[in-house]
Structures are given as structure tokens and as C-alpha cells.
């Protein structure tokens, strides 16, 4: 009984600590969003957003990341119900969708740089690459984290520590989808508006 | 935390994303569009905060909610403040040629703060 109480206390404490990290991460993204908003017209003779964004691809990215966030939630529900096979399937989907998102984003970046529209071309492009790239870096770290979680699961099985880690990962993953909504809206949709 | 909550959140988010995309593609005037897009994004944020991040389910004292509100306040200052100040600066310098802007900035620099 005492252990359960201690575990719950530890659980709440780590969750709030991690939540505080997410809030400070929001401030980081806020600065990048502010920079982007200020520099959005500073194209220095280079292309503007509406000339370089491929909206069908961006829409696909958005749906993929949203679905990934959803399957991550399903994994958490399966974990609570102790349905381990379902949870593993949901986590695998989360990983594959996340990796697909990152692949599309990297190919988009590679194409832009290949066409000479890299971050050095204009202030607008610098701000664009920094904002979207920082989000992409977070996604990359999330995918690494998920691999570590799976390795821990295979070595020790489901422990209370693992459940705590998994809950925090889900929080992180949902948070990244939340940030992407604003990138999708502010950078892409408002960028291509005529 | 049930599967129903996640399904509701997922479907609502999908609908809101599709709507935002549809409105943008079908071209309306820019001010209205920006307003609609901002509202759709904020609504989706609330949906995901409730259904995915479970904000508001915690027991008192609500540390998560309190820190979230503090963060929103700081975020608003950073974003709105930056846009406000920088747009004002651009507006006040709008009548100058690039060379005049350069000279003006150098003069300001020489004056010091």
C-alpha cells in the first residue's frame, strides 16, 4: 500500500516536471513564431511562401502526424487495459507514421536547398527553416525516445517506471502535434493565402 | 482516459484541419481568411488539450492549468509584442528609400541609446 502511494506521488511529481518543460518549450517556439511572423515578407528578391509550398504534401504531413498522435493515445489506452499486443501495434504505427512525417519534411527541405532556396537565401527562408526544422528535430528526438522505450520494454517488461516513461512520451508526442497545427496554419495556410 | 475521448479528439481535429485547408484553397479575402484560420487553429488547440493532453482532469491545485495560462500570457507578449513593434517600425520607415533607411539607421546608431 505504501509503495502504491509513493509511486503515485512520484508519478504526479514527474508529470508536472515534464509538463513544465513542455511549457518552456512553448516559449522557445513562440520566439521562433514571432521571428517568422516579423520576417515573413523579407524575401530579398527570392521566392515567397506561396511559390515554394506544395500544399498537398503539407496536408499529407499534417494528417500523418495527427494520426500518429492518435495511435499514441490508443497505445496508452491499451497499456491501461494491459492489452500488450494492441499496445505494441499502436506504438509501431506511431513510429512508422512519425518516421513518414519526418521523411516528407526532409525531402521538402532537400528539394528547397537543391533549388537554391536554402536558409541562406533570405530572412524569410532562414526563419522558415529554423521554425520548421526545430519542430522536425523534436520529432526526431521523439522517435529516438520511442526506440529506447521499446528496448526498455523488451529487457525488463512493463514496470511502474516504464509506465511513467510511456505516459511522458505520449504527452510529448501530443504536444508536438499541437505545435504542428500552428506551423500548418501560420506558415503554410497563411503563407499561400492570396 | 478512454478510447472514446481519443476518437472524439481525432475526428474533431481531422474535421477542423480539413475545414482550414478547404477555406484556404477556395480563396476569400485575406483579412477574413486570417481570422477564420486563427479561430480554427485555436479551437483545435483546445480540442487537443482536452482530449489528448487531458488538461483540466487533474485534481486541485491545478498546477498544469496554472502553468499553461502563465505560458500563454508570456507567449502572447512575445508574439503580439514583436509583430506590433516591428510593423510600427516598418510603417514609420515606409516612405524612405533603402539608402535613406540605411543612413537613418546609422544616424540612430551614432546617437546611441
Image: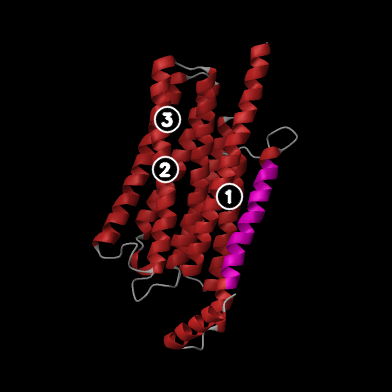
Between the residue at mark 1 and the residue at mark 3, the CA separation in whole angstroms equals 23 Å
Q: Which residues are magenta?
A: B65-85
The N terminus of chain B lies in which quarter of the figure?
A: top right
Residue B26 picture location, percent across and down: 46, 67
Please give the residue where the numbered disc 3 appears in the rendered image: A91
Are labels 1 and 3 assigned to the same chain? Answer: no
Q: Residue at x 43, y 15 (%)?
A: A156
Q: Predominant secondary structure in magenta?
A: helix
Drawn side of residue A50 relative to residue B80, left or right: left
Using the image, name the chain to which the residue with label 2 belongs: A
Residue depth check, mark 1 versus mark 2: number of the one nearer the observer: 2
- How far separated are the C-alphas under marks 2 and 3? 15 Å
Q: Quadrant of the C terminus of chain B?
A: bottom right
Q: Is residue A160 above or below residue B59?
A: above
Query: Does residue A84 appear anywhere in the picture?
Result: yes
**Mark 1 — residue?**
B45
Q: Residue at x 62, y 37 (%)?
A: B54
**Crowding near the residue tagged with mark 1, few <14, some 14–19, many ≥20 C-alpha atoms within 10 Å:** some
The residue that appears at 38% across and 59% down in the rendered structure is: A55
Q: Are marks 1 and 3 in contact (CB under 8 Å)?
A: no
Q: Residue furthest top?
A: A1
Amino acid at each position: 500500500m505504501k509503495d502504491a502511494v509513493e509511486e503515485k506521488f512520484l508519478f504526479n511529481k514527474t508529470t508536472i516536471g515534464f509538463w513544465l518543460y513542455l511549457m518552456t518549450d512553448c516559449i522557445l517556439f513562440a520566439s521562433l513564431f514571432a521571428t517568422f511572423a516579423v520576417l515573413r515578407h523579407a524575401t530579398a528578391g527570392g521566392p515567397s511562401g506561396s511559390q515554394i509550398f506544395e500544399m498537398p504534401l503539407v496536408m499529407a504531413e499534417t494528417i500523418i502526424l495527427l494520426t500518429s498522435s492518435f495511435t499514441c493515445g490508443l497505445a496508452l489506452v491499451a497499456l491501461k487495459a494491459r492489452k500488450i499486443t494492441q499496445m505494441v501495434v499502436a506504438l509501431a504505427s506511431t513510429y512508422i507514421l512519425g518516421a513518414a512525417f519526418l521523411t516528407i519534411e526532409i525531402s521538402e527541405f532537400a528539394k528547397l536547398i537543391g533549388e537554391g532556396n536554402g536558409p541562406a537565401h533570405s530572412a524569410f527562408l532562414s526563419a522558415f527553416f529554423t521554425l520548421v526544422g526545430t519542430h522536425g528535430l523534436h520529432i526526431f528526438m521523439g522517435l529516438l525516445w520511442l526506440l529506447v522505450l521499446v528496448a526498455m520494454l523488451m529487457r525488463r517488461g512493463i514496470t511502474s517506471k516504464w509506465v511513467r516513461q510511456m505516459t511522458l512520451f505520449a504527452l510529448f508526442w501530443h504536444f508536438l502535434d499541437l505545435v504542428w497545427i500552428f506551423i500548418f496554419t501560420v506558415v503554410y495556410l497563411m503563407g499561400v493565402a492570396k | 482516459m478512454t478510447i472514446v475521448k481519443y476518437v472524439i479528439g481525432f475526428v474533431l481535429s481531422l474535421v477542423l484541419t480539413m475545414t482550414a485547408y478547404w477555406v484556404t484553397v477556395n480563396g476569400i479575402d485575406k483579412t477574413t481568411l486570417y481570422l477564420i484560420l486563427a479561430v480554427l487553429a485555436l479551437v483545435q488547440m483546445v480540442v487537443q488539450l482536452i482530449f489528448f493532453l487531458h488538461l483540466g482532469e487533474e485534481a486541485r491545485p491545478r498546477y498544469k492549468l496554472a502553468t499553461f495560462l502563465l505560458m500563454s500570457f508570456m507567449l502572447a507578449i512575445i508574439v503580439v509584442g514583436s509583430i506590433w513593434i516591428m510593423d510600427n517600425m516598418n510603417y514609420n520607415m515606409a516612405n524612405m528609400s533603402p539608402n535613406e533607411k540605411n543612413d537613418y539607421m546609422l544616424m540612430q546608431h551614432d546617437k546611441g541609446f
